[in-house]
Image (spheres, helix red, strand yellow):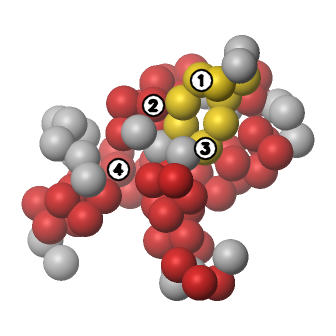
């Protein structure tokens, strides 16, 4: 799959480099674990901003939550199928 196809599959049209998207994908599982432990302060602000730009996370009721797109990206990063959750 080409980088353009990967971006289309992730539903993003933002100008992130392939290496930045890969880095965000690799760190997403650990960052979602931090969110589950209510430790969003442990996630670098630049990563939070990029996750929100990608639509993988959002603000809700004063806290950061992972979106459905973010859950799908997390599954991809972990090499899981959608039904493996």
Residue 84: which numbered mark, if any?
none
Is residue 42 placed above or below 83 in the rendered structure? above
Q: Which of marks 4 and 2 is nearer the N terminus?
A: 4
Q: Which of marks 3 and 2 is nearer the N terminus?
A: 2
Residue 30 rendering spot, x and y as whole percentages:
70, 52
Q: Which residue shows up at 58% across the image and 51% down it?
A: 28
Front disc: 1 or 2 = 1
CB-based contact (under 8 Å), mark 4 and mark 2: no
Does residue 68 appear left or right of residue 42 in this picture?
A: left
Residue 34 rendering spot, x and y as whole percentages:
78, 42
Front disc: 4 or 2 = 2
Front disc: 3 or 4 = 3
Q: Earlier in the sequence, mark 1 or mark 3?
A: 1
Q: Which residue shows up at 24% across the image and 47% down it?
A: 12
CB-based contact (under 8 Å), mark 1 and mark 2: yes
Residue 59: which numbered mark, if any?
1
Q: Mark 2 points at which residue?
A: 52
Q: Which quarter of the figure has residue 39?
A: top right
């Amino acid at each position: 799959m080409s980088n353009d196809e990967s971006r289309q599959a992730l539903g993003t049209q933002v100008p992130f480099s392939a290496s930045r998207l890969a880095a965000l994908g690799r760190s997403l599982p650990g960052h979602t674990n931090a969110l589950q432990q209510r430790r969003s302060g442990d996630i670098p602000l630049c990563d939070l901003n990029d996750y929100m730009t990608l639509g993988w996370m959002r603000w809700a009721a004063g806290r950061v939550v992972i979106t459905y797109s973010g859950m799908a990206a997390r599954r991809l990063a972990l090499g899981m199928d959608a039904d493996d959750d």
